[in-house]
Image: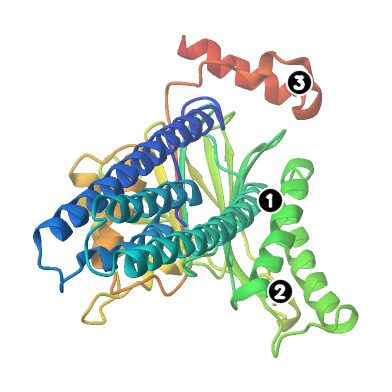
C-alpha cells in the first residue's frame, strides 16, 4: 500500500479525512451500480438463452447452460444478486416447462432441469455468501492494519509554522502496511524535529524495531534540547530492543538489528537547520534551483555504538525561505530498471527542480511517478520519502494562541512562533 501526504493544508488530518469520506461514498455508489448492472446482465442472459432455446432444434438444448449462470455470478457479486439470478434461472426453467406441454420428454427432463436449476441456485447462493463473508473478514483485517499504520506511521501535516512538508511511504511487501522504514515529525520547545530511518532486516522484526525507535523519538525529540541527546536516546532504545529479543523474548535474529537514519532540527527562531546522520545517505538541498548534498559527516547506524566509533556530530546550516530538503531511504536509490541500473536520484531531482517542481508535494509526486516508471517489477525494498521546505508564508491558524501549546512548548517558542505569524500578515 502506498501512502502519501502532499500539501494537505494547515490541519494534519482534515484533508485526508474528507478525502477518505468522499472515497467511501464513491465506492458505495459504485458497488450499488455494479450490482444493479450484474443483475440486469444476468436477466438479459437468461432471456437470451431462452430465446435461443425456442428457435433451435429439439436435440440442441441451450437451456442446459442456465444452471451454470448462478455460479458465475457468485464469483463476482454478492449473495443477494446471486439469489436473484438463481430465481430468474429457476423461473426460466419453469416457464419452459409450462410453455412446452406437448414436447417430448416434457414430464421428465423439463421437471428435472427445473429441479437442478433450483438446487444449483441454492448452492451458488451459499458459495457467494461464504465468499462475501471472507472478503468482509479481510476488509476488517485491512482496517486494523490501516489503524496500526496510522498509529505507527502517522501522517505528516502539510504545513506547520513556516514549514511545508510532504511524505510518501511504499512497503516492499505488496499486502503490507508497514515495514522497516520509519519516519516522523515532532514539534518541540527547541525546534521542529524530523527523523527518517531504515531498519536492517525484514518482516515483523523490522516492524517491531521501527515501532520502538518511533516511540523513543516522539518522547526524546520533545523533551531533549540537544539533538545529540535525542540521538543517544535512539541508540539506547535500539540496543535495548536487541537485548530484549536476545535474552528475554527469545526471538533473537541471527544478528542484532540496526538502523540507518537522518535526524533534523529546524529552528525558525534563528533560521538554522541541524542535520545528524546515522550512516544514512545525506539529504539533498534544493536552493535557488541548484541541488547539492548536505555535507553532513555520517556516524554509525543506530545499535552499533559498542563498535567504538566516534558519535555522529550535527551539521548546522542556514535554512532560508525557499530552501527544500529531500530525504529518502534506499528503496529509492537502490531501485533498478530492466537493465539493472540504479535510480539516478540526484540527477532526476535536478531535472525536477529545473522543470519548476518547487513545492514538497509536487517534488514527491513527480519523484514517485518517475520511480515507478524506472522500476523493474514490484518494489524490492521499502521506500520512504520526506520533503521539507521553509517558506515565508506561515500557516493560517497558529497553535501558539492555545494556552496548552504555550504551557507544553514554552513561552519563548510560542513567542517566536507568534512573531513569525505576525510578520507574515
Choose the circle earlier in sequence order: 2 or 3: 2
SS category of the residue bearing label 3: helix
Q: Residue at x 45, y 30 (%)?
A: 22
Identify which residue, 152 or 357, lies in the foreground.
152
Q: Residue at x 38, y 73 (%)?
A: 334
- Residue 373: name its quadrant: bottom left
Q: Residue at x 59, y 56 (%)?
A: 133
Look at mark 1 in the image and give the residue it sits on: 227
Task: Estimate how packed mark 1 is, as few (under 14), some (14 to 19) or many (20 or more) residues with alpha carbons within 10 Å.
Answer: many
In this view, the mark in front (2 or 1): 2
Q: Is residue 148 left or right of residue 177?
A: right
Q: CA distance from mark 3 to mark 1?
A: 22 Å
Quick one: which residue is furthest to the right in this view? 248
Q: CA distance from mark 2 to mark 3?
A: 35 Å
Residue 11 locus on image (x, y percent) = 55, 26
From this view, report whether residue 354 is shown above or below residue 181. above
Residue 158 locus on image (x, y percent) = 48, 33
Numbered mark located on residue 406 in the image? 3
- Residue 67: name its quadrant: bottom left
Q: Is residue 416 left or right of residue 163?
A: right
SS category of the residue bearing label 1: helix
Identify which residue, 44 or 306, lies in the foreground.
44
Choose the circle earlier in sequence order: 3 or 1: 1
Look at mark 2 in the image and give the residue it sits on: 303
Residue 277 locus on image (x, y percent) = 57, 62
Residue 175 locus on image (x, y percent) = 51, 65
Q: Are marks 2 and 3 in contact (CB under 8 Å)?
A: no
Task: Estimate how packed mark 3 is, as few (under 14), some (14 to 19) or many (20 or more) residues with alpha carbons within 10 Å.
Answer: some
Numbered mark located on residue 373 in the image? none
Amino acid at each position: 500500500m502506498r501512502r502519501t501526504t502532499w500539501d494537505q493544508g494547515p490541519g494534519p488530518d482534515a484533508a485526508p479525512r474528507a478525502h477518505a469520506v468522499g472515497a467511501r461514498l464513491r465506492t458505495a455508489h459504485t458497488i450499488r451500480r455494479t450490482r444493479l448492472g450484474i443483475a440486469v446482465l444476468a436477466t438479459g442472459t437468461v432471456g437470451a438463452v431462452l430465446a435461443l432455446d425456442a428457435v433451435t432444434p429439439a436435440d440442441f438444448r441451450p437451456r442446459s447452460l442456465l444452471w451454470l449462470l448462478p455460479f458465475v455470478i457468485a464469483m463476482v457479486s454478492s449473495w443477494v444478486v446471486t439469489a436473484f439470478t438463481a430465481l430468474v434461472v429457476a423461473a426460466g426453467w419453469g416457464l419452459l416447462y409450462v410453455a412446452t406441454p406437448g414436447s417430448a420428454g416434457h414430464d421428465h427432463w423439463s421437471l428435472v432441469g427445473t429441479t437442478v436449476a433450483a438446487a444449483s441456485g441454492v448452492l451458488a447462493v451459499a458459495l457467494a455468501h461464504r465468499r462475501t463473508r471472507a472478503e468482509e473478514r479481510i476488509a476488517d483485517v485491512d482496517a486494523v492494519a490501516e489503524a496500526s499504520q496510522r498509529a505507527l506511521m502517522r501522517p505528516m501535516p502539510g504545513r506547520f509554522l513556516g514549514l511545508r512538508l510532504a511524505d510518501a511511504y511504499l512497503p516492499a511487501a505488496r499486502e503490507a502496511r508497514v515495514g522497516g522504514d520509519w519516519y516522523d515529525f515532532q514539534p518541540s520547545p527547541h525546534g521542529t524535529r524530523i527523523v527518517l530511518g531504515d531498519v536492517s532486516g525484514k518482516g515483523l522484526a523490522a516492524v517491531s524495531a521501527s515501532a520502538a525507535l518511533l516511540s523513543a523519538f516522539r518522547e526524546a525529540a520533545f523533551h531533549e534540547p540537544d539533538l545529540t541527546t535525542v540521538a543517544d536516546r535512539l541508540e539506547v532504545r535500539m540496543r535495548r530492543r536487541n537485548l530484549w529479543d536476545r535474552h528475554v523474548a527469545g526471538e533473537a535474529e541471527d544478528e542484532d538489528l540496526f538502523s540507518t537514519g537522518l535526524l533534523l532540527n529546524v529552528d525558525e527562531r534563528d533560521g538554522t537547520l541541524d542535520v545528524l546522520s546515522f550512516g544514512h545517505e545525506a539529504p539533498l538541498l534544493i536552493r535557488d534551483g541548484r541541488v547539492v548534498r548536505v555535507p553532513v559527516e555520517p556516524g554509525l547506524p543506530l545499535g552499533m555504538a559498542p563498535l567504538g566509533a566516534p558519535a555522529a556530530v550535527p551539521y548546522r546550516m542556514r535554512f532560508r525561505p525557499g530552501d527544500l530538503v529531500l530525504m529518502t531511504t534506499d528503496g529509492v536509490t537502490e531501485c533498478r530498471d530492466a537493465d539493472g541500473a540504479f535510480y539516478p536520484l540526484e540527477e532526476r531531482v535536478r531535472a525536477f527542480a529545473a522543470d519548476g517542481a518547487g513545492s514538497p508535494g509536487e517534488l514527491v509526486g513527480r519523484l514517485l511517478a518517475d520511480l515507478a516508471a524506472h522500476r523493474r517489477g514490484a518494489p524490492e525494498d521499502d521506500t520512504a520519502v520526506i520533503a521539507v521546505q521553509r517558506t515565508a508564508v506561515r500557516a493560517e491558524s497558529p497553535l501558539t494562541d492555545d494556552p496548552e501549546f504555550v504551557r507544553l512548548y514554552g513561552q519563548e517558542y510560542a513567542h517566536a512562533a507568534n512573531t513569525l505569524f505576525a510578520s507574515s500578515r
